[in-house]
Amino acid sequence: MYKKILLAVDGSEHSLRATEEAIKIASLSKECQIDVILVAGYSKAKGEVLHASSKEELELKRKEKISPAINKINDTHIPYTMKIFHGEPGPAIVEFANNNSYDLLVIGSRGLNAFQEMVLGSVSHKVVKRANCPVMVVK
Amino acid sequence: MIETIKNEWFSNIRGDILSGIVVALALIPEAIAFSIIAGVDPMIGLYASFCIAVVISFVGGRPGMISAATGAMALLMLPLVRDHGLEYLLAATILTGVIQLILGVCKIAKLMKFIPRAVMIGFVNALAILIFLAQVPHFVGISTLTYIFVAITLLIVYIVPRFFRTIPAPLIAIILLTAVVIYGNIDLRTVGDLGEISKTLPVFLIPDIPFSLETFLIILPYSFALAIVGLLESLLTASIVDDMTDTESDKHRESRGQGISNIINGFFSGMAGCAMIGQSVINVKSGGRGRLSTFVAGAFLMFLIIVLGDLVVQIPMPVLVGIMIMVSIGTFDWSSFTYLVKAPKSDATVMLVTVIIVVATKDLSKGVIAGVILSAIFFVAKISKIKVTQLERKEKIVFQVSGQLFFASVESFVEAFDYKIKNQHIVIDFTDAPVWDDSAVSAIDKVVVKYRENNNKVNIEGLNESSRKMVDRLAVS
């Protein structure tokens, strides 16, 4: 069964549903671990720095995005790790997944609205195309 | 020492060289357009960008950050150039550097945290609006063809990056559309129509101005505003780069570095500049991390100036206008609209006032100063709110004070008590109210005296250590 699952979240409803699915799969096996990552997008850095009155507030805001997923996993007995880092969401998730050889990558279908997706492109689409491991897109 | 140099310069050679080249390409349109905003020959902006980038790569405090000629600075210098000419601008640039260097040595960066985010948000929004407004005379009411070329430029800069990112889209727009205009013999205003362009290498010159007190007093206000705005944008950009790269930077060194680079830049016929948010983000996104990326950006820009020199004059103005519209859209903080609704009313007001004052005065430094003063007033007003609650407890009347007791809150503190009480045992509880200054102690004294006049017994309770010391030193209790 799956032993190492990578769960990429962005704080949206979709990524919360992705978390639920990741938990379902992980609970099938005893040794399964979930690694939760949140990529803080480069393009958002300007706005985020501008709106945070300190570095600490910025870190807190980012943690708030990942914590709903962490809380859900915490309710189970599945071991997990958590990591927040910077990059372009799509390529950064792919690189992280490919460097750490996962059995499965779980990701929410889209947290962006139609217009944002037109301008920015779909993250999950990019990930499905380029990741070397099986990818589960949850909608 | 050698380890640091190695790490800051040569730990990411491939990434730094590639990203430096990308940034140099992206700098060209902006340097030209910002020169036009300032009312100077495009070469002045290009020289400045080369000079600042190269110097700051050695003396800056934030490796990987890009500094060059910027819109914020260009907007400030326009009146100086218009009224007194280029030589005064060069002198002002040198003086700007000197002021920044002094402020840097005095560790001005520490003061940055006192500038509220509402002011910073107002700053970038005002900057975006001014950059846009500066374009209006170059495209409104000139010709239908002008509008069409602005529109085509916008389409290129927004759509091309979806498919192709190796070369910055603005440069693609410039090359493509300039070629179309030249070979199609299309009649559009070009950069050359705005002034002469000299294609010489930057040389060391002492600005040709009378060295008198009068000259100094002409340039001083401009230099001061330039110094403040330059440091503000540079330190904001440094924080953004810190965040994007998950690293720290030396803000004091950066402040001094901005000063040094402007001094040298002024002597080499450049206009004052500072760090650029947009270009620094492009640099980090393209893989730039070290000092080498900034150096390559400057050096490669010089190479491009020499190669492309003659073409610069033929760039159609509508294309530059389109690119500047993109820059202003990118600079504007679009989440400000939600901010206006969600943030506290006082913060939203500060943000709006900052924007309005900048747009009205065309001076970013005035908006920042007004914003800081206004938010300081709001802050004092907010923390000077003091609440006194009256309770009855075991035949005693207890007044619970909550809030900060200091010069601004003493008036409402004194007025909050009911002085009709007679012949009672009164307790004033300061558990939730720190006492800050002599005005506060004097106010407590006043209240106590008033109650005693009516034959009440008064006790003061719950003072914390430092408050207790102040009250013991000065008052009756």
Image (cartoon, coloured by chain):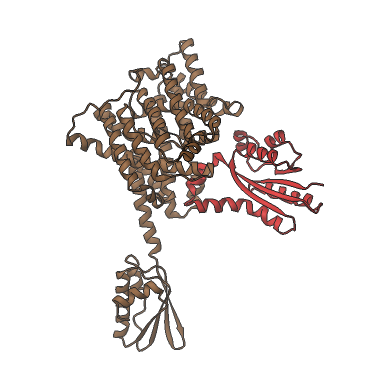
Residue at (32% x, 68% y) in the render: B437
Tally the marks. Answer: 0
Is B54 or B277 nearer to us in this picture? Answer: B54
Is B181 situated above or below B285?
Answer: above
Is B324 or B111 nearer to us in this picture? Answer: B111
Q: Is B138 positioned to the left or the right of A61 in the image?
A: left
Q: Quadrant of the N terminus of chain B?
A: top left
User: Does any portion of residue B92 appear in the rendered image?
Assistant: yes
How far across and down, in percent of the image, does residue A96 sit? 66, 41
Q: Which chain is brown?
A: B
Q: Is B220 positioned to the left or the right of B339 in the image?
A: left
How far across and down, in percent of the image, does residue B374 sit? 36, 52
- Residue at far front of view: B2
How far across and down, in percent of the image, does residue B206 sit? 25, 27
Residue at (74% x, 58% y) in the render: A76
Is B376 situated above or below B399?
Answer: above
Is A46 or B449 nearer to us in this picture? Answer: A46
User: Does any portion of residue A138 appear in the rendered image?
Assistant: no
Chain A display color: red
Residue at (41% x, 68% y) in the render: B403
Is B422 situated above or below A66?
Answer: below
How far across and down, in percent of the image, does residue B141 sit? 40, 24
Residue at (21% x, 36% y) in the render: B216
